[in-house]
Amino acid sequence: MAFQDFDLITTRHKQEKQKKIRRRITVAVVSTFVVLLIAGAAVCAFVYQKNQSVSTEGNNTSHSSPAAPSKPAINVAEKAVKTVCATTDYVKTCEDSLIKSVKNNASAQPVDILRAAFSAASEEIDSVIKQASDIKIEGPFKKAAFNDCLTLLHDAKDELNSSIMSIKGKDDQDHMSSIKPELNNWLSAVLSYQQTCIDGFPDGPEKDSMKKLLKTVREMGSNALAIVSQVSSIFSAFHVTNTHRRLLAVDEAGYPTWMDHKHRRMLKADPTKFTPNVTVAKDESGDFKTINEALKAMPEKYTGRYVIYVKEGVYDESVTVTKEMVNVTMYGEGSQKSIITGSKNFVDGVPTFQTATFAALGDGFFAQSLGFRNTAGPEKHQAVALRVQSDRSIFLNCRMEGYQDTLYAQTHRQFYRSCYITGTVDFIFGDAASVFQNCMIYVRKPMENQQTIVTAQGRLDKRETTGIVIQNCKILADDKLEPEKAKFRNYLGRPWKEYSRTVIMESEIGDFIHPEGWMEWEGDFALATLYYAEFGNKGAGSGKDGRVKWAGYKTIKKDEATKFTVGPFLQGEGWLKNPDVPVRFGMFT
């Protein structure tokens, strides 16, 4: 009986299946017919519009204005701009600057609009530089700040030009996706330079005037970052896709075709083959007695690494590795033997930007076994030992000693490994994307009634790809602070700018750190917009129970913490791949 029932069920199933097949065939036939009707209608509409256009052109020869036929096309281009600008924070500034650009390009594509955004910002910087000459500047300090401002604005323009060159002649989504990290890197620096310009002035009419002048270009820089961050969505909205995927275009040497000569020179360099081009020695046993002399001897547009060996000695000089000096390697006999020292400081009338004993600006800078000091002391306030603007810079087994503002990690991507860093207030600060691995961070005894703060990160925009990451390090009180640590409040960081971002993970935090962990800058400024996070830390100062309750403070999990490791955060696997440079691209645990 069971078998008979099974046979009946099988027959019914076959009948139902045949009915479904017939229904599907019917639907397919009807659908095909509908598609053909739509296609036919589209063709008819196209032919009709074409005929109308031809007819209109004929009539225009004697009756109509020549500009009339282009109006619908321009409207389409304007709609494209509005679509792109909708992703930004400053929509009116975006539309006002970009609609002008598409008037002569009615078929503008996303890459054209992005290029126009970069160009508009660059042109606005030119305008600011011209208008700035009308600001009345009096006194040596303000004049120095003004000169710094001009330098920084030119640096911002250079970054925008790099952005423009990287997308020149490119209009596909694959290319845009491949260079997105570079664009984010350059545009984040553009915003930082503008703010550093403003910060250089003391409060007063000059600062207010410069802030007003830079308002529009600041908004344009933010908008450009916003557009880049949404580039894939924008391309999809415009239905710009590749008919087939292709590899990133490279030249005969294997470098991306968008990369300019300076960046190619940087990537050609091997940072670990230490055959010195020149030797610096105070005892005259080398080629030069000073580091500055050795740098001046570097040939222009040198290909490969220019290696400077610094023998044991204390070199009292202000050193700048300029932007043109790409791929400089400088190594010493030990961070407590080969030392560059200085004492410039804010109290003595020097802007913070200029107080650095050593400034590394040229891309691809690599320092090993060197000491950088600023001996001004805590009573002199801001006094920078090392300022780093160099992209893809590496510091290995180095020592940075100071008090307030010891290490200015200013802009771009920076990697610090096995370094020794000391200070009192905001002594690791700036707006770079910086990762510190296996470093010893020692907090010094401050002045009476002062707090100590390790970090002060300066991220200005929520889309900037910058932040301070401290991974597998030790944060401890030094020998002089340790016996008196209870007298002072000691913190991991405070928000210098609105979107300040600092992550401390897999590190040891000493018991001298206040249970709250983090300190306000002023009132509730940035407490809801900052991003402060901790993961996997140990030590008596790592407890989470007493931590601040700000909206921006987070205790994160491993998957979130992984985003801030060297691989994804610095794109480190592309430039820290030499086996002789010790680096952990991911988590330690």
Image (tube, grey):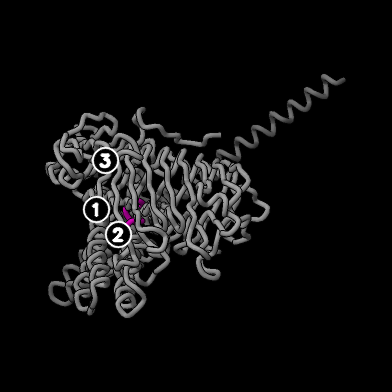
Judge whether 160 appears above or below 64 on screen. above
Q: Residue at 24%, 76% (x, y): give it.
A: 139
Q: What stretch is highlighted in magenta?
A: 184-190
Left/right of residue 72 with respect to residue 286 in the rendered view: right
Q: Residue at 34%, 50% (x, y): give it.
A: 373
Amino acid carrying mark 1 in the image: Ser
- Give the number of the disc on residue 313: 3
Left/right of residue 171 with respect to residue 475 in the rendered view: left
Marks 2 and 3 sit apart, C-alpha to C-alpha, by: 20 Å
- Asked whether 430 falls inside the magenta stretch, the response is no
Label 2 Cα crowd, 10 Å radius (few <14 / some 14-19 / many 20+): many
Q: Which of marks 2 and 3 is nearer the N terminus?
A: 3
**263 vs 396, nearest the viewer:** 396
Q: Residue at 53%, 65% (x, y): give it.
A: 449
Residues marked 1 and 2 touching at CB (< 8 Å): yes
Label 1 Cα crowd, 10 Å radius (few <14 / some 14-19 / many 20+): some
State the image coordinates of residue 273 (x, y, percent, origin top left). 26, 29
Q: Earlier in the sequence, mark 1 or mark 2?
A: 1
Q: In which quarter of the image is residue 25?
A: top right
**Residue denoted by label 2:** 344
Amino acid carrying mark 2 in the image: Lys
Marks 1 and 3 sit apart, C-alpha to C-alpha, by: 15 Å
